[in-house]
Image: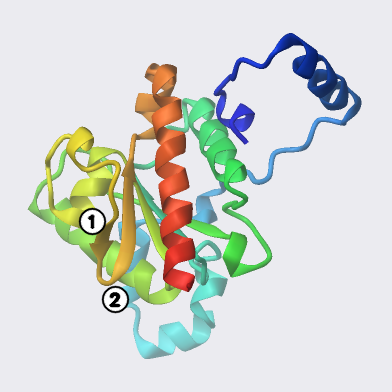
C-alpha cells in the first residue's frame, strides 16, 4: 500500500530478494479508476440541480442518472478541482485511494469515494456560498461515514478554519456529525513528495475513525 503512494521503505537484503521476486512474477495491476467529469460534484452542477422545476426533475429521472458520481458512499473527498493539465494529480489520487482499498468508481458503497470539487479561484462570499451548497447536497445524497479534506481549501470549506494544515492534521474533526480528516492537497504532495508519509498517516487515521464509527 505504501508503494502505491510512492513511499519507499528500506528492507533487509535477504527479505527484499524474496519480496522482489514475488512482485516481479505478478502482473502489473491496472489503475483502479480514472476520474471522469461525471464523477465529480461541482457547486455549479448542484446549483443547477437545485433550480430545476419538479417537472424538469421528473423528466430527467433520478439524481444518479444526472450526476453519476453523486451516489451513496462511505467516503467523501473535498478538494480543489483537479488540474487537467497535470495528470499526475489524478494518478496520485488514484494511488492514495487504492492504498486504503477504495476508489472513485466501485460497485459497493463501502469501497466507493465521491469527490466534491470546490469552486475554482480565490475564495469570496459567492464561492463560499456555492461550496457550502455543494457540501450540503453531497452529504445529503452520499451520506458519507468519513470525509477527507485535501488541502487548506477543503479544510476551510468544512471547518471554517483558515489555520495552517499543521494545526489541523493528526486529529478527527467533525462536520454535520461526520468525522473529518485533514491532509495535504494533491498539488502540495507532488511538489513535496517527502510529505507523502504524513499523508499516509492521515489516511490511516481516516480508516481508523471510520472503523470506530462502525463499532
- Secondary structure under tag 2 reads helix
In this view, 53 is above or below 47 = below
Residue shown at 39%/23% (left/top)? 195
Q: Position of residue 214 (x, y in %)?
A: 48, 72
Q: Residue furthest top?
A: 13
- Secondary structure under tag 1 reads helix
Q: Is residue 65 visible?
A: yes
Q: In the drawing, does residue 136 fall left or right of residue 193?
A: left
CA gap, disc 2 to disc 1?
24 Å
| Mark nearer the viewer, 2 or 1 | 1
Residue shown at 53%/32% (left/top)? 92
Callout 1 crowding tier (Cα within 10 Å): few <14, some 14–19, many ≥20: many
Q: Is residue 47 visible?
A: no
In this view, 5 is above or below 192 = below
11 and 68: which one is in front?
11
Query: Residue 51: which numbered mark, if any?
Result: 2
| Numbered label tally | 2
Q: Position of residue 78 (x, y in %)?
A: 35, 51
Q: In the drawing, does residue 64 fall left or right of residue 162?
A: right
Q: Residue furthest right?
A: 25
66 and 33: which one is in front?
33
Residue shown at 18%/55% (left/top)? 159
In this view, 186 is above or below 65 = above
Query: Residue 158: which numbered mark, if any?
Result: 1
Point out the tag, 2 or 1, that comes first from the N-terminus: 2
Asked if labels 1 and 2 touch by Cβ distance under 8 angstroms, the answer is no
Q: Position of residue 200 (x, y in %)?
A: 47, 36
Q: In the drawing, does residue 191 fall left or right of residue 12?
A: left
The quadrant of the image that shows the N terminus is: top right
Residue shown at 65%/68% (left/top)? 108
Q: Position of residue 133 (x, y in %)?
A: 25, 66
Amino acid at each position: 500500500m505504501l508503494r502505491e503512494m510512492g513511499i519507499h521503505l528500506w528492507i533487509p537484503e535477504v527479505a527484499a530478494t524474496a519480496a522482489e521476486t514475488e512482485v516481479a512474477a505478478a502482473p502489473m495491476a491496472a489503475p483502479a479508476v480514472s476520474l471522469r467529469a461525471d464523477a465529480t460534484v461541482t457547486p455549479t452542477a448542484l446549483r443547477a440541480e437545485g433550480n430545476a422545476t419538479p417537472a424538469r426533475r421528473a423528466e430527467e429521472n433520478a439524481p444518479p442518472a444526472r450526476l453519476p458520481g453523486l451516489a451513496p458512499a462511505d467516503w467523501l473527498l473535498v478538494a480543489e478541482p483537479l488540474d487537467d493539465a497535470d495528470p499526475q494529480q489524478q494518478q496520485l489520487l488514484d494511488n492514495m485511494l487504492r492504498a486504503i482499498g477504495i476508489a472513485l468508481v466501485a460497485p459497493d458503497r463501502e469501497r466507493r469515494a465521491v469527490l466534491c470539487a470546490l469552486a475554482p479561484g480565490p475564495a469570496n462570499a459567492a464561492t463560499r456560498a456555492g461550496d457550502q451548497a455543494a457540501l450540503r447536497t453531497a452529504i445529503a445524497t452520499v451520506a458519507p461515514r468519513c470525509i477527507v479534506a485535501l488541502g487548506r481549501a477543503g479544510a476551510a470549506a468544512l471547518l471554517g478554519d483558515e489555520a495552517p494544515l499543521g494545526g489541523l492534521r493528526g486529529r478527527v474533526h467533525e462536520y454535520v456529525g461526520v468525522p473529518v480528516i485533514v491532509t495535504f492537497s494533491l498539488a502540495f504532495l507532488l511538489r513535496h513528495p517527502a510529505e507523502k508519509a504524513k499523508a499516509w498517516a492521515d489516511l490511516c487515521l481516516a480508516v481508523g475513525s471510520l472503523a470506530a464509527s462502525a463499532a
